[in-house]
Image (cartoon, rainbow, N blue to C red):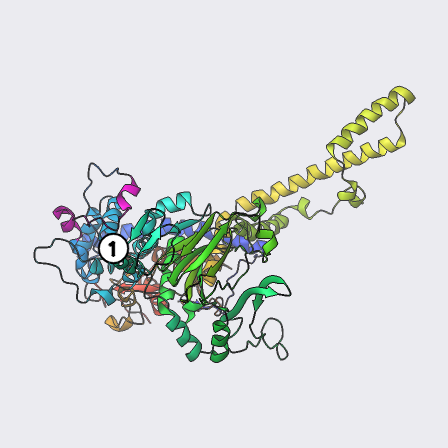
């Protein structure tokens, strides 16, 4: 049975070297357990087949969702951009009848399809790229909100008689988390004509991308036309385009948040203005400072914002920044949760509301330590984006200070554009930017989605190298040996000699020897110091290489540590209606009991992770996380080390597959049921009972 550990901060802290050695030893034992149990269960399975008819044992991986049955076409080698680019005015291509027959199974209830049918579907999936291609074509006209909340739009959609086209609202409800996340990101990029694959190859961490129906948008004139470089959009077309991000956040939503909930300065809300004070333009923050008189450390008592004060400052030209809009907004939370699956890292957001009427600006020019996606939700805002100032400021690990007008006056922006509703701007870390509203009276509202903060190779090494040093020091006597006596008398900047100085000394020495036939004492001291420095550096390099060699052997452990940090950082999962229906909170069949023939899988991909710590198998998960960063500490589950192979099978079985409890690797069926029950009760597993429960085995 599992024991729930005390709260854990879930950071990437170092562990003692003895524990590390035990972990490696236990990992080897787990590998051996897998082999032994697999062999034992094969013998037991063969005996059961000869002795009596055993209840049907399902495959380890059974398809849960009805998948696209896709044939291999001769022209499947078409370039991805040619397939995925969707022109707005182009009539939607009709699917071939054969393709429609392939995907019609997705219109049925995927959770109650027979096991035999699922196994058949797995064998008929065919080429995954072709599957994704057809799925993309079916859902190409869905907005981001329609992809995430299809059940809200499905009502009232009727197909014409004889129409072979699948209903995208039904299809999207039965796709996997990975497919939904990809469709979502492709929808965000759609007006650019780029696929997500092309974006990652050419733009991700490299350069900004403007995603817009037109380039360099200006506000529409009185005739309702909007001009962009070389084309016009009709008024109705523009209205349709501007609905791309509808349904996530609005000014009315923000007004309701500030009015109905206790929004605190510096924690939930900032009020800022970039304006001239004392003849110099700078960012001014109008937040009321937290009360620190009755607190210790960083436990500040933040001041609650008064609604009237906030909107008075807004009307005077200030920008409102919501630091965690997804805290109170389920739809923004769902958007971010799905993008976490697409990017594989923590994703956060801020919302910025700036008044119109004049070029109002809330923040000074600066760069951030995040990959930023600007989603323009309402109104218009002028953006200027500049290249990183230097190589050291390319992909930085920290955000910059505010830059002054004088520092920016001679730098030409690489992007100078007015964003309107439906537009998106992507900026990598380190790209300097500033933005202000236009002369229009309309306010501007945009959502900044952030990713990749503290998620670099340097951050992984920041975890690994200290642990490698600790472990290597425990193993190596030479690393624990004392530093050379009086080494500071010849090492350090004040004693350092450049190569040119050493060469000059050698030249001077030859001249001296020819003239005086002997080397001066001063020259001998310099040569002796140079030899000591070389010896010290050589020995230091050996020590460093010893630590680096240890670090290489700890890559897997380092990945586990940064995975724990990710689980601590990330948002709680956002379940679809179909996913939630299979978890312990909503599943009432069998009275919440796990049986030998119960089908199970991880409730959501990447929801939980298995690590080995202190001779225990420990399962970390993000179910108890808060939408506020690090508000709730991790609460892992602790199992015996012999449970690790079964846990590994459970946590690596994800949609569209299932695994039967009796097929888990473990010594007896009761333990298998207990392990699955513990994870299911915690909400980590989804269940599906295809056949009548096998009640021949009972547990406590």
Residue 647 appears at what percent x and percent y?
38, 58
Task: Residue 555 in the image: state x and y as whole percent.
Answer: 50, 47
> Element under label 1?
loop
Which quadrant is home to the N terminus?
Answer: bottom left
**Would you say residue 451 is visible in this rendering?**
no
Image-based side of 669 in relation to 118, left or right: right
Q: Horizontal placement of 525 versus 17: left or right?
A: right
Q: Quadrant of residue 675?
A: bottom left
Q: Which residue is mark 1?
A: 141
The residue shown at (56%, 64%) is: 275
Whether 681 is among the magenta residues is no
Q: In the displayed orientation, state which residue is furthest to the right.
A: 516
Q: Which of the 4 image quarters holds residue 111?
A: bottom left
**What segment carries the magenta color?**
79-103
Among all residues in the image, which is located at the extreme top? 514
Q: Residues within 10 Å of mark 1 (few under 14, many from 20)?
A: some
Determine the residue positioned at 12% across, 48% down: 97
Residue 247 position, x and y percent, is: 32, 66
Name the foreground residue: 233 vs 663. 233
Q: Quadrant of the C terminus?
A: bottom left
- Residue 86 in magenta stretch: yes
Residue found farthest to the left? 161
Residue 645 horizontal/vertical position (percent): 38, 55
Pick whichever, 647 or 527, lies toward us: 527
């Amino acid at each position: 049975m599992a024991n729930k550990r005390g709260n854990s901060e879930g950071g990437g802290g170092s562990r003692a070297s003895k524990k590390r050695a035990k972990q490696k030893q236990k990992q080897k034992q787990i590998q051996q357990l897998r082999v032994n149990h697999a062999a034992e269960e094969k013998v037991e399975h063969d005996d059961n087949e000869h002795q009596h008819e055993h209840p049907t044992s399902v495959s380890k991986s059974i398809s849960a969702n009805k998948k696209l049955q896709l044939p291999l076409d001769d022209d499947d080698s078409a370039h991805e951009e040619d397939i995925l680019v969707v022109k707005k005015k182009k009539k939607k291509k009709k699917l071939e009848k054969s393709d429609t027959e392939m995907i019609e199974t997705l219109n049925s209830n995927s959770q109650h399809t027979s096991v035999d049918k699922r196994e058949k579907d797995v064998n008929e999936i065919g080429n995954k790229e072709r599957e994704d291609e057809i799925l993309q074509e079916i859902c190409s006209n869905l907005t981001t909100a329609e992809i995430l909340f299809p059940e809200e739009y499905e009502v009232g959609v009727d197909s014409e008689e004889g129409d072979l086209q699948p209903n995208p609202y039904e299809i999207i409800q039965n796709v996997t988390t990975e497919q939904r996340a990809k469709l979502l990101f492709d929808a965000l990029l759609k007006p650019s004509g780029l696929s997500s694959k092309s974006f990652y190859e050419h733009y991700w961490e490299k350069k900004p991308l403007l995603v817009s129906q037109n380039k360099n948008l200006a506000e529409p004139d009185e005739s309702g036309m909007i001009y962009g470089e070389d084309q016009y959009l009709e008024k109705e077309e523009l209205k349709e385009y501007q609905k791309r991000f509808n349904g996530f956040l609005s000014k009315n939503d923000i007004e309701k948040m500030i009015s109905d909930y206790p929004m605190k300065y510096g924690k939930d809300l900032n009020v800022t203005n970039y304006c001239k004070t004392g003849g110099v333009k700078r960012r001014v923050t109008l937040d009321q400072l937290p009360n620190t008189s009755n607190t210790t450390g960083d436990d500040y008592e933040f001041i609650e914002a008064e609604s009237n004060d906030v909107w008075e400052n807004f009307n005077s030209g200030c920008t409102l920044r919501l630091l965690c809009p997804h805290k109170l907004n389920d739809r923004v939370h769902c958007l971010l949760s799905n993008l976490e699956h697409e990017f594989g890292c923590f994703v956060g957001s801020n919302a910025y509301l700036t008044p119109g009427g004049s070029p109002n600006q809330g923040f000074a020019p600066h760069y951030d330590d995040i990959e930023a996606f600007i989603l323009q939700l309402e109104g218009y805002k002028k953006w200027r984006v500049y290249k990183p100032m230097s190589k050291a400021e390319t992909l930085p690990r920290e955000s910059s200070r505010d830059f002054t007008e004088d520092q920016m006056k001679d730098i030409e922006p690489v992007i100078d554009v007015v964003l309107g509703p439906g537009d998106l701007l992507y900026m990598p870390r380190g790209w300097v930017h500033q933005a202000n509203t236009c002369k229009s009276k309309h306010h501007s509202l945009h959502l900044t989605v952030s990713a990749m903060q503290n998620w670099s190779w340097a951050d992984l090494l920041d975890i690994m190298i200290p642990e490698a040093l600790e472990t290597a020091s425990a193993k190596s006597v030479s690393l624990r040996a004392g530093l050379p006596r009086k080494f500071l008398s010849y090492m350090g900047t004040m004693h350092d000699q450049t190569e040119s100085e050493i060469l000059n000394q050698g030249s001077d020495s030859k001249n001296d020897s020819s003239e005086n036939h002997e080397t001066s004492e001063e020259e001998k001291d310099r040569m002796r110091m140079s030899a000591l420095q070389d010896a010290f550096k050589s020995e230091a390099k050996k020590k460093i290489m010893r630590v680096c060699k240890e670090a290489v052997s700890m890559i897997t452990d380092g990945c586990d540590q940064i995975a724990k940090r990710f689980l601590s950082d990330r948002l709680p999962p956002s379940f679809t209606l179909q996913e939630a229906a299979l978890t312990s909170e909503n599943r009432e069949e069998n009275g919440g009991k796990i049986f030998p023939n119960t089908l199970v899988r991880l409730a959501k991909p990447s929801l939980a992770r298995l690590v080995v710590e202190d001779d225990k198998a420990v399962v970390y998960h993000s179910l108890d996380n808060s939408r506020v960063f690090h508000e709730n500490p991790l609460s892992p589950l602790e199992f015996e080390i012999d449970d690790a192979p079964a846990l590994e099978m459970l946590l690596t079985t994800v949609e569209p597959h299932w695994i039967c409890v009796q097929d888990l690797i473990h010594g007896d069926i009761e333990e298998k049921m207990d392990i699955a029950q513990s994870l299911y009760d915690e909400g980590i597993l989804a269940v599906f009972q295809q056949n009548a429960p096998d009640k021949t085995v009972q547990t406590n």
